[in-house]
Structures are given as structure tokens and as C-alpha cells.
Image: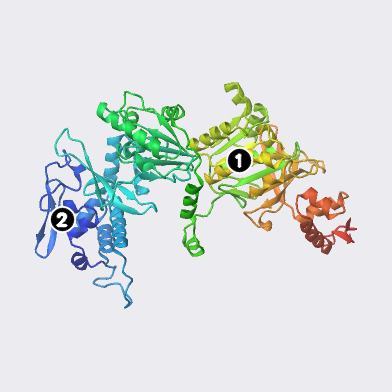
Amino acid sequence: MTDLNECRRRLPLPELMGRLALGDNAKKSARCPWPQNHTHEDRNPSFGIYQNGDGWRWKCFVCGNGDEVTFLEKHFGISTKEAIGRYGKLAGVDGKAGSLPATKQVTPEQPTPKEKTERDLGDLWRNCVEGFTVEHRQKLAEWRGYSVEFCEWLQQQELVGLFNGNTAFPVHDEKGRVVGIHYQVEPQNGGERAKWRYEGGCNARPLVIGNAKTAASVIAFESQWDAFAVMDKQSWHKAVPEVEAAIITRGCSNGELVAGLCAQDATLFAFKQNDGADDARKAGKWLADVSANAGCKVMLVTTPEQHKDANDWTRAGATTAEIGKAVVAATVVSAAPAPLAGADLKGGMDGSLVDGAALQAMTVEPREFIVRPFFKVGDLGFIFAKRGDGKTWLTMLLAKTATTAGTAGPWQAEKPCAVLYVDGEMPAEETKRRDKALGTTTERLVFLHHEIYFEQTGRTLNLADPLQQDAVTRLLAEHGFRVLVLDNLSCLFAGMRENEADSWELVLPWLLRLRRMKIAVVIVAHAGRNGNMRGTSRREDQAFWVIKLERSNGDGTRGLKFTSLFTKNRNALEDDCLPLEWTITEEADGTAMVSAKPISGVELLVNWVNEGLDSAGDIAQEMGISKGQVSKLAKKAEAAGRITIKGRRYRPAEGGGNV
């Protein structure tokens, strides 16, 4: 059991309250740390602490009285047993009475004053977060019109806490470390504005949520209340957008704090407040400062004039759709800046240099699988085949698998994700039929169909057009899509010369930008007469994987039967991604039965030899692999008695054999 006497010796009540960011309340007369229990939020001090013999006690006219343990019970809403355990941890006392943790007799390396301050502030902020109780979350939700779930998410992300009884927010440095606490002090007299203060001696810094340096779309606000209102409506607490970030400048005089935070090719959507005449001038200056310092395209999102700000708008009932429409209708404040000069670019490169030791010390998040064992976040992949050989069927099946966390043969999705499927060829009725045939429809799989787009706008889809590329990028960012499917290359990219490598430059920069945004792209393409993917081979240089399909309905089976073979795969070993034989059979009720069985590379080679191909070059061309790989497979087939090799010619073996 925990030695309470040792706890009280090490961490008496005043110091305990300081550790919980309640040092201002540790006085003989102070505001209660739990103002939600008071009718008037304890504007007249009713709380105090005092010494009682060798120990300390607290009292409150409303909340009661007690010692350190009862204080923790009250503060965290926990049982006496839990409070004793937490007190022991805070005081550094283990579960054995009177015992101290064993330590080696070594002199520890002393932190620098700066490191100690950062460590202390980090610990202090974690205590602030822990002190933000269920009651505080409910109060914040009621006060600002947020959902309780969003307030819970804010606390889970350590973006809100309680400092000296006041709502508080972290101040981070460039590396994400807590270097201060920004908190609101409620006015003592009615009619006064709440005051904001900083703990930790830090200067004003923006609150950045998400990775603004890689985000394609950034939303910016003067106030965290407005930011949280919009983020709540956008359901950040359910799924944080992969390609969006939020910047809060903490006041209308801090617009310049956006400097250096955004990528040059990003779009920043500024939510300016609609305040009175004097404040309107300040809000106008804020927008001008943001525009001058963002370093990217800036758009103004207009809040309806009858509402003073975004939070006022949401409290009045603004819906997610209404906010979305306001974002779409945003007006340009400033265009993207001109490209940097060589000297400026060099400065950025200098700051990005890392040696081997620094590289090894860096924390690099591994890319997650979307579909195991080959499809990862940010991938560029190709699926190609001749007409009618199953490429759209397999691509739609892969998209369904990703959106439902399902399976496709041996392939298994990790978790559900949103997919945008851009169809540039199929009739809408056929897309509808196949979507239904492949299983339950889901709102995570969204189609941008060329026929529907034309009916709605009178325009055609052409993703070789930079403006349409930008429009799709914004769709991806605003809706949180993690996968983009382009079906297919020849229909969606008009004006490109497939066989010219230079034409690919119309598309490659866009695809690389999507990779930096962690959006995976799957492109459907046609096979040429030689069996390889049609057009320049340069397209495959940036691909993580390429899948070739070939129809195999030579045995009279019903339905569509084809084989899939990886001709390139950076994400998995060959043995983890064997060739597969797929069978898709449509039933009378419109559903499709899908099955897949693995087949070895040796089996494929034997099939081609039995079909009459007798050279490594011919078989390599059909299988989409190198002649060296064919040679290795041929030796295995010969060892198994499946073929014979005479010189450089392959012949079927008499009586077959086993692999």
C-alpha cells in the first residue's frame, strides 16, 4: 500500500496544487478550483487552504473540505483508492510503505536550464490536461456550442487543459514541444472582456493543428473558438483530414505568425471575423497580414454578416453543408507567390541538410498499409491489361476493399478509408451495375463520373489540365480522401502523347504533390500490342507497384477469369505477392462471386511453354518480367520435370511433372 505520510512529506497540498496547475488557488482565500459547482462560478472567493498541525487541509463553503487525497478525489472525480494511487505516483512513492525506489549511485547528467524549463512546462501542461474533467468538457461544449465528443477529442489531443482554474491551451515550438501555456482569465466585473495571458515567459506563437507544411488546404483563424467550431462541424474528432491543417494566430494582431508555416502550393482559407467598426479595422489588418505572410494562395471565407464570427454562426445553427458552401465560394485575396530565387532556395536547402547521425536520430513515421501486402499510403500504382481483361473489375474490387476494410482474395485492408474513384470511360449505368455487384455500397467510396459531370456542368474531364488537377486536389483535401483512382489513363488525360516521356511532365508534378499529401493514386491503363503497358516506360519510374492482368478463359469456365501478376513491387517480396488467378461470376440476382487462388511463376511459365512460346524473350514480354527472371523460373520448371531446355529453347515435358 502507498505510504501517505511519505507522500505528504514529499508533496504537501500547496505543492500538489502547483503540480496540477492550480498554484493560484493555493491560498488562504481564493476562487474555488471547481467553479462549475457554484451558482455564480465562485466570483467571490470561497476556497482556501490552511495548515493543521503537521499537515495541510483545504476547505470550500460549497464543495466541502479535506486533505490531499480528498482533493484528488474531488478534482478528478475518482475513488479514494484511485486517488491514493495517483497521489503516490505524483509524489514518487511506490506501493510499498515507506520504501523508496532503488537507484544506482551515479551522478546524472544535469539538464541545461532551457531543457529543465521545457521539461517542467511539458509536465505542467500534462497536469493541466488531466485536470480538465468531464464537467469542464461539458461546460465548454455548452458554452461554445461544441459537441461533447469534439471536446473529448481536444483533450485526447492535449489541445485543452485547466490552468489555475482557467481554460488553457498549449504553446508549441517548431518541434511541437510545449514551451508555454495560453490561458483565459475571466473578468471580475460584468461588461469587461476576458483577458489572455501566457505562462512560461514565451512570446505569442500560433497554435497549429495538423501538418501545415504538407497540407494542401489550410484553414486559418484569429481565435481558437472559431477554429474549433469549424473543426467540430468538419468532424475532425471522427477522422482528422489527412491533407488539411488549421492555424490559429491567437488574436487579430498576430496575422504575420502564419509566415513559414504553409507549403507554397497550398491554399489557405482565412475565416475573418465580422466585428464592430474598430474591431473590423483590426480584422482587416489581420487578413492583410495573413495574406502578406502566408507564402501561398489565400482565399477569404465569408461568414454571414449577421454573425460576428464563425463560432457565433455555428451556435446559431450553421450546418456542415453551409460551411462547406462558404469554403467553396471563397474569394481570392492573394495569388500564389512567384517562384523563389536561387539564393532563397539554397537557404531552404541548407536548413534541410542532415548528416547520417542526424538522419538516424530522426523520428520517421513508417507508411501504413492501405491494403496488405502491397498497397501503402502515398503509393502510385498501375493496373493495366488489354480491353476486356478485367482491369476495371479488379480496380473497383480493390477500391471496395479499401473502403470497407474487407478482403480481395489474399489481400486484406487495414482499416476503412475514403476513396475517390474518377471514371472517365464506363457508361454510368455500367458503373452502377458493377458497384452493386461487388457488394454493399458505402459512403466512403465516392464516384466522380465523366457522364454525370458533363450533365451537371457541360464540361469534360481532362486531368492533363492544371486547373482540373487543382480542383481534384481541393476535393481530396476537403473530403478527406486517402485514395484516388483514375480509370483510365487514355480517357482522363486528353492531349498527352502516350509514347513521349515529356508529355508525362504534364501529370508527374501533380502526382508527386499528392504523394507528399499522403494520398495514394491508382491509375488504370491499357496494354499495348506487345503485352506491356501502353506508352512511355517513364511512367513506371515513380510507381511503387504495377499489376498486369491477362484473361485466361481458355478452359470454358463461366464468368470472367484472368491472372494478375506484379511486374514491379517496392513494398513486398515476390513470395508475398504471388500471381493470382481470379474468377468473377455474376449471379442472376446481380451480385458477383469473386474468388482468387495463387499460382506460381513456374506455373505461368509452363502455361506459356505449353502455348508454344519457346524463348526467354518471348515469355518475358508476355509475363512482363525480365529475361533473367524467366531463366530462373525455367530452371525450376525443368528441375520439376515440367519442361525441357535444349540450348536456349524451351519445350513441354512429356507427362508433365510437379512443382
**Residue displayed at 29% across by 49% down:** 203
Up-down: is 123 above or below 157?
below
Name the residue nearer the viewer: 479 or 3.
479
Residue where numbered disc 2 is placed: 66
Does any portion of residue 231 appear in the rendered image?
no
Q: Position of residue 590 (x, y in %)?
A: 67, 32
Q: The residue tagged with tag 1: helix, strand or loop? A: helix
Which amino acid lies under the numbered mark 2 shown in the image of this protein?
A: Gly
**Residue displayed at 33% across by 77% down:** 104
Does any portion of residue 448 appear in the rendered image?
yes
Give me the disc on residue 399: 1
Name the residue nearer the viewer: 56 or 31.
31
Q: Position of residue 437 (x, y in %)?
A: 65, 34
Q: CA distance from mark 1 to mark 2?
A: 60 Å
User: Which callout, 1 or 2, points at the residue further toward the start of the chain?
Assistant: 2
Q: Residues within 10 Å of mark 1 (few under 14, many from 20)?
A: many
